[in-house]
Image (cartoon, grey):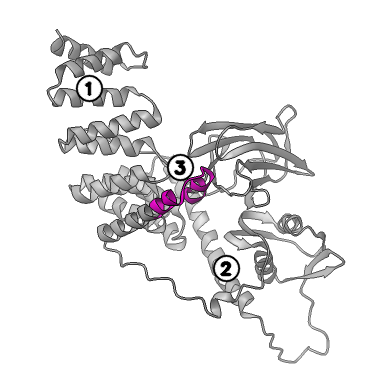
Amino acid sequence: MAKTVIMGLILLLGLPLHLSAGELTDIKVGKQTKEEIEILIEGAFDTYHGVSLLSPARFVIVFENAQLKEGVSSSIQVEGPIVSRIKTVSQAKDVRVILESANTSKLFHCTMHDKEGKVIVKCWMPAEASSRTKNTSKADASESDESLALHQKNLNEIFGWPKKAQEEPKGKEANTLDKYTGEKITLDFYKTDLQNVFRLFAELSGKNLIIDDQVKGELTLALKEVPWDSAMDLILDLKGLVKEERLGTYIIKPKPAKSSEEKGELVVKTFSEEILQPARILKKEKEDRQQAQDLIIEAHNLEALGKKEEALTVYEKAYTLWKDNSDLIMKTAFLHYSLGRYAKSYYFAGQALNMNPNNSEAALFAALSAAQMDNSKDARQLFEIAIAGRPEIPEAYFNYAQFLKNQKEYSDALSIYQKHERIFGPSVEVSLAVAGIYEAQGRTVKACTKYREIQKSGFNIDKKAHGLIHKKIQTLCN
């Protein structure tokens, strides 16, 4: 059976490292492609949180209770279409790492996770945004939209999903948050001190800030693309706090206690619906997410001990509480695939695709699972989605070509391998596969030329592959 290459997914949850307070010792750029950049941050700190901001577009990561080690650059220039500069700023007991967008008017997306003592930040420009930055024509944009619509149509047919209903016209309920005019932001806090939370809002608003000594506690939440003033009101309501504004200064303090006149009386306070309903939803989501994060940590520890079965059971419990976490879904799909549970892997990959039809990694796992279950028709469509999705990943091309080769569709397989080499550069695995296709087609001269080319390429070839190439040249080419 042909080799299958899959990705060892790391759960991208932005959970804090459990390190003692200290300093950031190194910040550098890791892997970088046209579609994605990786930033590696080493050091010790209490916790961290990230927020996307506009004007100019940037992603800010705050490391609490940390300092910047002497000698670590405070400004790193970056070449590429996503991040233009990495800037570091030390403030009191915090260090801020600011990733400035290469396009000052366009936000990019980031995920954070820790691995082997490093915080790894992966950032990419959303497809719709990157298409604009490349000055594509209206025809190109239209073609991209049609491609996404086609993916969704194909996925509906493959997984048997009902067609998504058309968007209903906006009515009164849709406009309940219209009073909020603040810049839209994405927030990700994990057990972050409330005082630091409100300092962030002071920066966003440009207001001075006074925080009452009685304001204490921590906050864990994740909000995507919400006005900052709406997010602030939700947090205030959840934490039993109020905000007063005097002469350009915000005063944050606990809600006042009932007066003596109110004691013994039944007092009913009316909350505006735009505050009350989101607050209820957020409170439930916060409780579920906190429980899910605890389960994820437990599952991660089990997985680190090699207990995949037990880890998978716990990951699935976390999924029931946090169903819109695409990284958790992908981790579950990966583990099911690695354990040979292809139907389950297919299901979870489908859930991730339902959230984002352009998710190349989810499409790849769905395609691999479909192929393992001998569902060639769906596998073919899913592989097409995988190589057309974002980010572009070499595994999608390699596995699609292997699938086509197994189907004896040699010309199509050869075309995909050649695309792989054009996009990601030459590799010994792809070169051997191409030589094998030439051989299967009876094109002995082309096969011999390729095998000799590999032999002289300077690739780091293991002993087994080296022996195979030598044998092929002896038997085919003499």
The residue closer to the viewer here, 13 or 2, is: 2
| Residue occupying the far right of the picture | 247
Identify residue type, mark 1. Answer: Ala
Identify residue type, mark 2. Answer: Leu
Identify residue type, mark 3. Answer: Ile
Between marks 2 and 3, how big is the CA–CA gap?
27 Å
Classify residue 48 as left or right of residue 419.
right
- Look at the image and say whether residue 54 sits in the magenta stretch: no
User: Do the CB atoms of the residues marked 2 and 3 lie less than 8 Å apart?
Assistant: no
* Range shown magenta: 127-145
Quadrant containing the N terminus in the rendered view = top left
For image coordinates 66% across by 69% down, the residue present is 180
Label drawn at residue 10: 3
Residue indicated by mark 1: 435
Instruction: Name the secondary structure under disc 3.
Output: loop
The residue closer to the viewer here, 4 or 169, is: 169
From where the camera sits, is residue 389 visible? yes
* Horizontal and vertical percent position of residue 2: 22, 33
Q: Is residue 259 above or below residue 184?
A: below
For image coordinates 51% across by 42% down, the residue present is 134
From where the camera sits, is residue 340 visible? no
Classify residue 444 as left or right of residue 290.
left
Label drawn at residue 282: 2
Instruction: Name the secondary structure under disc 1.
Output: helix
Q: Is residue 331 above or below residue 394?
A: below
Label drawn at residue 348: none
Q: Is residue 48 above or below residue 213?
A: above
- Look at the image and say whether residue 129 sits in the magenta stretch: yes
For image coordinates 68% across by 51% down, the residue present is 55
| Residue occupying the far bottom of the picture | 265
